[in-house]
Image (cartoon, rainbow, N blue to C red):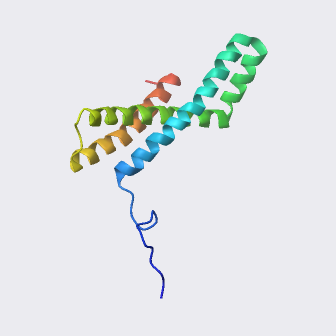
Amino acid sequence: MRERPLSPHLQVYRWPLSMALSILHRASGVALSVGAIVLVWWLMAVAAGGDQYQRFVDCVGSPLGKLALFGWTLAMMFHLMSGIRHLLWDMGWGFERERSQATGWIVVIGTVVLTALVWLLARGGL
């Protein structure tokens, strides 16, 4: 006979959307903190001038650098959308199950749309 877990376990239950978004909100905050280090590097490279700035541009312009910038943009847009949702919760709005589910999907869709919009504008599109 197989022993069953004594308490609920993460592998047993499906994560509710709000739980996943809450975890991602924290993770995106960490990602933004790491991205701030890149921002400081950029400012220091600008201050240092020519060669240092060119090294920064080469690094950020590489495929891995662009992927990191895309991830940072995604984290920023997600954290913004999720932060607005948390602000609404702080005001006492949106705790009902249907509204919480709807605002969760608005966060997900809004993140994708805003990230795409930022990258299209950065590329000279629109």
Of the pair 119 and 46, the residue shown nearer to us: 46
Q: From this viewpoint, which residue is outermost toward the right? A: 51
* Identity of the residue drawn at 63% across and 27% down: 37
Q: Quadrant of the C terminus?
A: top left
In the rendered image, residue 44, in percent from the top left (x then y), is placed at 69, 16
- Seen at 40% across and 67% down, the residue is 8
Image: 52 above or below 1: above
- Kindly identify the residue that appears in the image at 71 percent across and 23 percent down: 56
Residue at position x 34%, y 32% in the image: 84
Would you place residue 6 above or below residue 110 in this image? below
* Side of 123 where 8 appears, left or right: left
Q: How many marks?
A: 0
Give percent across and percent down for residue 69: 58, 32
Whole-percent x, y for residue 109 in the image: 36, 40
Q: Quadrant of residue 85?
A: top left
**Where's residue 21, x and y in %?**
40, 46
Q: Toward the viewer: 81 or 33?
A: 33
In front of the other: 28 or 126? 28
List the single residue furthest toward the bottom: 1
